[in-house]
Image: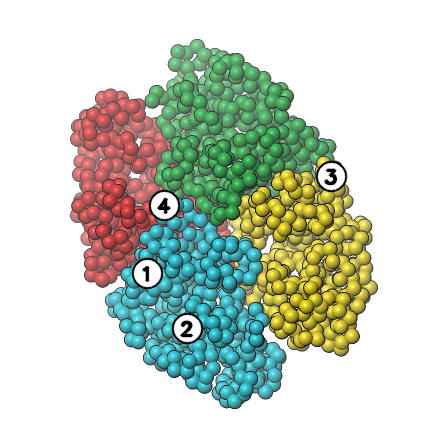
Chain colours: A red, B cyan, C yellow, D green
Amino acid sequence: MKRLGWGMIGGGEGSQIGPAHRLGARADGRFDFVAGALDHRAEIGRDYGTQLGIAPDRAYGSWQDMLAGERGREDRVDLVTVATPNATHFEITKAFLEAGFNVLCEKPMTMTVEEGEAIVEIAARSGKICAVNYCYSAYPMVRQARAMVRNGELGKIRLVVTNFSHGHHGDATDADNPRVRWRYDPAQAGISGQFADCGIHALHMASFIADDQVESLSADFASTISSRQLEDDAMVNFRMEGGAVGRLWTSSVAIGRQHGFDIQVFGETGGLRWTSEQPNQLVYTPLGRRTQIIEKGEGRLHEDAQRLSRVAIAHPEGFPLAVANIYCDLADAISGEIRDGLPLAQDGVRSMAAVHAAVASARENGAWKDARPSIFR
Amino acid sequence: MKRLGWGMIGGGEGSQIGPAHRLGARADGRFDFVAGALDHRAEIGRDYGTQLGIAPDRAYGSWQDMLAGERGREDRVDLVTVATPNATHFEITKAFLEAGFNVLCEKPMTMTVEEGEAIVEIAARSGKICAVNYCYSAYPMVRQARAMVRNGELGKIRLVVTNFSHGHHGDATDADNPRVRWRYDPAQAGISGQFADCGIHALHMASFIADDQVESLSADFASTISSRQLEDDAMVNFRMEGGAVGRLWTSSVAIGRQHGFDIQVFGETGGLRWTSEQPNQLVYTPLGRRTQIIEKGEGRLHEDAQRLSRVAIAHPEGFPLAVANIYCDLADAISGEIRDGLPLAQDGVRSMAAVHAAVASARENGAWKDARPSIFR
Amino acid sequence: MKRLGWGMIGGGEGSQIGPAHRLGARADGRFDFVAGALDHRAEIGRDYGTQLGIAPDRAYGSWQDMLAGERGREDRVDLVTVATPNATHFEITKAFLEAGFNVLCEKPMTMTVEEGEAIVEIAARSGKICAVNYCYSAYPMVRQARAMVRNGELGKIRLVVTNFSHGHHGDATDADNPRVRWRYDPAQAGISGQFADCGIHALHMASFIADDQVESLSADFASTISSRQLEDDAMVNFRMEGGAVGRLWTSSVAIGRQHGFDIQVFGETGGLRWTSEQPNQLVYTPLGRRTQIIEKGEGRLHEDAQRLSRVAIAHPEGFPLAVANIYCDLADAISGEIRDGLPLAQDGVRSMAAVHAAVASARENGAWKDARPSIFR
Amino acid sequence: MKRLGWGMIGGGEGSQIGPAHRLGARADGRFDFVAGALDHRAEIGRDYGTQLGIAPDRAYGSWQDMLAGERGREDRVDLVTVATPNATHFEITKAFLEAGFNVLCEKPMTMTVEEGEAIVEIAARSGKICAVNYCYSAYPMVRQARAMVRNGELGKIRLVVTNFSHGHHGDATDADNPRVRWRYDPAQAGISGQFADCGIHALHMASFIADDQVESLSADFASTISSRQLEDDAMVNFRMEGGAVGRLWTSSVAIGRQHGFDIQVFGETGGLRWTSEQPNQLVYTPLGRRTQIIEKGEGRLHEDAQRLSRVAIAHPEGFPLAVANIYCDLADAISGEIRDGLPLAQDGVRSMAAVHAAVASARENGAWKDARPSIFR
């Protein structure tokens, strides 16, 4: 198996997400970390890159330098990960796609729907992969859930209920902490706070497992800490194209919830439950029968779930390896085997459309809005 | 302690709720079961009553006979429980209150808000107790939760999230089963299905623990099984008078959920979680500290929680003893010691107002509605 | 259904176990509490009895008075519960059995094996029921477990693993508290501390579910708080007559365990797990298939489990209703329908033999001992 | 940070443990996988090595070739992992240590105590690191548990209770499956089956967290599937040098248990519980206070727990990253910063002494045996 070249933009020293990407890319030995522009401060970024083992000539001072440097190389990177501040995702992703690179972009892929639609179009034109890091969808048991739905094991889906709630922004006295504050400040975060931060993971998950798309939604937003301009708690009701009803609650003031990202999917002949704090099990109830525990690695899983698990049953695998699974799928995709589950630019633009629809709905007291980008209506 | 006389209307042979009330009334030995009109079929009801140990002259053939018979007795019952079909609650409760009896009415107390308001007024005028069987609020750890909120242990309440979801009506092929069908038929169930059946327990619980009242709401109803006229799944967003945000999801098609009645309450300085399938614990997280498990019987509970528990820590107590706690509070109330937690006609009419507001909102695509009866606006 | 007369010895004001028995006897309305000798202080016992509704002439000052008073009555009690200090169980139980009363004796039934054997013989001769309050075995899901084993759903049993551990005696500074100290003092507690107090519940449960008897055992006892003469922690390995291996751990210094009474049973074709803190579920894994959750009330339970549950699926029932189930079985037995699951004097004497065998083994560094009373060898 | 050179012996295609080591070594980017003798079939091993990216001249056909090849190189590997069949561990580990390589050996380190003692001596003489892969001890929350014990947060330890039980060998019809059978065949597995396979992980964990050593033990072994010569179920009671009592149960026929490796530690002032299927939490009860949930990443953990966690609170990390933590500690150790928690040859020889003591005890009906290698008596 040929090892691929990988580069990263952003994710420098002190970043949370940088190490997760590096671990994810490295874990299965399919990528070599060979290039990077890790910091907007050129010198610091170059130093950190060489410290991490990048050759000096590929430890770039800016993404523009990296683009210029890599595009000319024979051995240019096979994949670029964009882990910069949200507002810059569009510009960088666009530039690299246009130059013929495969890109993994952190979420949110863009700030507007129009930008998102542009990325979809550019990716299509370039023939390159533009993936978005909805990494929760790469947990083996999430892939199992999706496969079960596709396989008809739940019948037609009626209802999807998902939460992504935590309490880490619940301290009002901490509201001026810059690591918290920016998320509720439209100048930095855009038009939505908690829904854009966590809610879209849950919404993507709903579509992913139910194997259907969100068509319309109605939102109720609240800023429970009054100094906040953007919402720290949101409820979104939605309808999917196939007719399923959706319920999504997301909060950052749910004190005591640590990482309360859960999903339940109910169909005509069964129900499923998955929770991100115990990601290695899936709780399944076939209609009229007992609830069963499906375990990662149990040996009768669908192929995608089997493939993305590394160690034996009940040996837990966690979040960093879900990120690694995105990289596995990317390595396969770059090598020509497109995996159906890999989240792409299409997913990214759908999220942006949902964010904009939710904000508009919340402003109009919950009026129902079309949640789709115009290219998918 | 003087034992009190107790009678029951409805709850005859084969009824689910009848045995729960008899166990509840008997468990602590404060009531003697001395009178009853247990079935609308007079003979069957009388037979069953004597079988259960009621003296023949107090085993009545109808509630009207019971009213006539008991009102004239010196040793008339101290409490009448009304456990008849929903549409008859108003008439019977009204008649017994007016005749000077204390009443425990099953939920829903009435079918309309106006009837509910009438009951509140009649109860006030009569000086008698009219309680409604929101028995979940009588679990010791629910009382503990309310006491903690009142005591300021969570700070000002920001957010209440509650679910009451099960999957027992999730089988479409069972939709014609008369035990299921009537709940979704307006001719029998009234204007609401699942929200009126389970949702109002959750809404009452929200008010009860948060120690606040629901002011307004917005509802999204769905009949996920298309033959149903009334909703089998509902989401209700609400606001409380004190400003708290509320989220309530209720479903009867959540296959695999057995009795998914949970509540989470989040304030400025802490969060709580309680779930009805493990009712003897309360999960509490003070802001910035670790999550703790509060156990029934642990010895540092608030008075009300301590009083309503019978056996030592971690010896579970369940649903029938929550009903018994309602009877404990009623025995105290009849004996002159009014317990703050006992759910009363005021709670019953608030529920009806919320049901009507939710139905109106759902019909208008989620328009926000005042959820209060006019007497409480 | 004829209501039966019930009387109680011991269980006076302030007792833990007294209220549990009264609730248990009352819950299903099959017994009337008509006689009692509730306290060794005659006046206090009589007062408390009348306070609880016993007629003055049947509120006795001593068990001897009660025996004398009741044996002469036409309407004498149908059942006597003995809930006095352990050392008196034998004498009182013997006297009432010999006088032709049915008896429910608290555990331990006696202090010696010989006394236990005598009770078995007397009960047989008298034709009366002598039950012992191993109430955990009356939980519906424990009955389900036993029925599954009998029904061959686990195949031949290979292994039983059970724990009964708590931490309520873990505070060394509390070791002089008289409510704790007596349990570790041979003058008051007899030859064993924690094993005789909690361990024998677990050992009975092992026999009960595995439907087999303990044949031999090896014990390791420890007094982890050095001031204690009797063990506060014990491990007992055992073998059953049918060949199954047993492991039993019991402790009172397991700080953080509240009521850690669990059992796992493993056979050739499946495994089961039950835990007393969540008694309404049973976790079942058929060989080579997924783990399933069996719920009280689920509708496909074995008859005994179905019969002893009162409210719908996932409405929890707890410890007091397990005690009530013992009274249900007793009411049936007195009425002529002997229930197989009711724990009897035979179980009581087996426990005493096991206690004596364990103590002897522990003293000899774990030497294996026959655990059976001589009448069952 | 200089990247280190790493090589592997064994762990070829189809091996379970090979990929876990490679992932562990790669995850944090501190080792480059540069040499290997991955299979006892020379050609297959060389091919697989080059496939995994090893240069052809360092893809060796045997461990002897690798030893010869690497010892002469300037850039020789900094660490060799030995993941060959158990019976070969001693010879290979010894050879590489003597040649001046650092070694990570899979467990069991040797087959006899004498061999283990030899390794300890050789490692000391060589000044090289000889680690043993007790990887469970490298979970962040296990390190936290140990730190809490050391820090006195539980007081003097009284009791350690640990289980390592699964049911994956519970199918008697599968007993001839070669992947199962060898474990119970003395010719292949040595003198112990399940205890040597899983039990020693639990015993190491007990010592690790309690920060004390096992002094003596008494064992009860059973072959519940009669065709097995070695035990598939074992109970070991032990005493630690500091006086603590230990209980260890291990089984491979516990059908329904997947990976039931749990530990509870009880001291004078608190109790702890950790379970390998939910490794990111620790349950802690300070004496007389409520049980608390300690979360990986919570921000008030002891240094060692903090250091070995990569992603934010409640983002689970699992088994492969526990292995990676061993490699982190090894990278530090090789770089001169010895981490206290790294399991070493001393731990390996203690395990062998315990296995031999347990076998001897089981043969003598549980007679107590000194569990220490002679060098540590």
Of the residues shown, which amino acid type is indicated by label 2? Leu
Q: Are marks 2 and 3 in contact (CB under 8 Å)?
A: no
Q: Earlier in the sequence, mark 4 or mark 2?
A: 4
The residue indicated by pointer 4 is B288
The residue indicated by pointer 3 is C363
Alpha carbon distance from label 4 to label 2: 37 Å
Which quarter of the figure has residue A103? top left
Instruction: Bin the neighbour count of mark 4 within 10 Å (Cα to Cα): few under 14, some 14-19, many 20 and up.
Output: some
Residue B246: give its label: 1
Q: Are marks 4 and 1 in contact (CB under 8 Å)?
A: no
**Residue depth check, mark 4 versus mark 1: number of the one nearer the observer:** 4
Task: Give above or below for A208 relative to A105.
Answer: below
B20 to the left or right of B349: right
Q: Chain of mark 3?
A: C
Q: In terms of depth relative to the viewer, which is nearer, B223 or D271? A: D271
Residue at 71% from the left image edge and 33% from the top image edge: D367
**Residue depth check, mark 3 versus mark 1: number of the one nearer the observer:** 3
Residue D350 at x, y percent in the picture? 59, 26
Alpha carbon distance from label 2 to label 3: 62 Å
Residue D181: give its label: none
Of the residues shown, which amino acid type is indicated by label 3? Arg
Task: Give above or below for C339 relative to D357.
Answer: below
D87 to the left or right of C121: left
Tags 4 and 2 both on a single chain: yes
Helix, strand or loop status at disc 1: strand
The residue indicated by pointer 2 is B344
Task: Give above or below for C26 relative to D10.
Answer: below
Alpha carbon distance from label 4 to label 1: 23 Å
Residue C11 at x, y percent in the picture? 65, 63
